[in-house]
Amino acid sequence: MALLAVLAIVVVVVGFTGRAARWPTDAYLVTGQATTEPPQLRECPADAPLPGARAEVRPPPGGWPGVPQAVSVFNVFGGEVRLEYAGRVLCGHMHDARTRDSRFRAGVGMVIVPQAGSQEPVVAYWSPPLKPGWIPTIRVGAPSEVQHVDTLRLVVRTACLAVALVLAATALMAYPGSRDWTFLGYALLCALSVVWQGMLSGLVGYPEPWLPVVGHEQRWFVGLSCAGLGAMLCGMWLLVAGPGLDALVRRRMVLATFVSWLAATVFALLAPEAWLSSTAVGVELAFRLVYLAILGWALQRLWHHQYGAIPALAAMAPFAAIAVLERAGSRLLLEYRVEAIQLSITWFLAVSAYALNLRLGRLRRQRDEMQQLAETDSLTGLPNRRAGLRRLDELFARARHHGAPLSVAFVDIDHFKSINDEYGHEAGDRVLMAAAEALRGAVRGPVEAARMGGEEFLVLLPGVGAHAAVQRMEALRGRLAAQGSGLRLDGLVLTASIGVASLQASDADAAALLRRADGAMYVAKRSGRDQVQLATC
């Protein structure tokens, strides 16, 4: 370790001094090279039909100022956007970033330089939306301002996808340790939300298409909406149900959601074109009805002081807020609908991850409790035989590695059968508990004394040599006598036969050390009991 520390210091010092010598304070770096390629702006094909919806962006009173103007169209979920001004025509596809002006990444835009006082409008065309209320937004203004808004939209949309990917990876990493299928279902939900959000935001085409949606945007939009909304409803239901839900039921819900996702996607990809609009409206209506039912259930649980429903209510809150804003006719929601939906999905995934972390903590506590129960003697509270032998193996390996002393003691309560016969088994149990209490006072840690079975106990003494171990066990005899007196059983004298063995070079393993201690204990019994014997070989 010291050598590694010295090497690290040398590397840091040499690296700093070398960098200072190589790069003076007035240095700079130039990368890339000049290009001869013209801007990659896509002109509309001459025979391309005009999209079905049209809008004119008229100049302010007095005509256009004679300065550059930016026009950008957002929230178009299918087909191309066409912009026309003064004989200039530009087309861009929301799901193929290669077709758009590189200055606009969240929408389709263009920069014009109108003559001062010109009254000619900018004309925009797009395909009619599938669902009422999902109307496009046209933003006009200074190029820097419009581009800043466009960049902000792109950052929000990309960040939501990144969060979903991180949460999916976290759930996948948690599954091997938990063996809980809920984590796989959650990872699938996050992955589905990435594709769904990519479709909503147009990021499936950034920087170039990675999903074959071009030409079939409406089908993909409906299919992924079915899958995404159905998966979120399943997640909401699981959140409201809480940790009391049976694991088999939870697994079936996740499986049913996965099958529904496949069915919805296949249906949307194969359904006739005329059905898509009504299907999209029906899916949204079904989502709202089921959402209201789940929300009512969560509120009912909260009313009955079942506070486990709070995470579910927190996860569902943004969708209720969107519904309220939509009902109020919010212009802000119309303009930033995609961002609002993505942020709501991301919030839902984050709260669900919080609930999963709580579940993982519960699973770990349950596992620890089960392990403790499996390794603890129920009567005395001491580690049982299995735990004691495992701890002995650990201490044996450590003592061999470090060359440290190690002693063990085998403790057998004298005349225990006679105690049971004379005072009863209840009194025998009290004697064993008293002996366990005396053992706890004789060792340093709670795992260094164990009940081996019946009236036999094992004491582990790491770092203790033979002479000191014998002294400790003599003190234990005194503790046992004092504990026996405290039981207030007439005529009872609590004694023990104790065999001590210390680690020797001839001990091949921990079992050999234990056998020598066991043999010394039997010597103590044959020699009259109530004594400590040290194993000599």
Image (cartoon, rainbow, N blue to C red):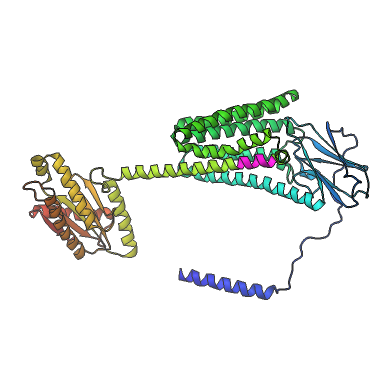
Task: Give the residue at x 60% y 31%.
Answer: 230
Left or right of residue 469, residue 343 in this image: right
Task: Give the residue at x 74% y 66%.
Answer: 29
Picture quarter with the C terminus: bottom left
- The answer to whether residue 338 shows anywhere in this view is yes
Image coordinates for residue 105, horizontal then vertical, percent: 76, 47
Q: Is residue 505 above or below residue 108?
A: below
Image coordinates for residue 488, horizontal then vertical, percent: 10, 48
Image coordinates for residue 412, horizontal then vertical, percent: 16, 50
Magenta span main SS? helix
Task: Give the residue at x 52% y 46%.
Answer: 173
Which segment did they paint magenta?
Answer: 338-346
Q: Residue 161, located in which quarter of the rendered image?
A: top right
Q: Residue furthest left?
A: 491
Q: Specify whether residue 339 is painted magenta.
A: yes
Task: Give the residue at x 61% y 31%.
Answer: 261
Q: Is residue 14 above or below residue 249?
A: below
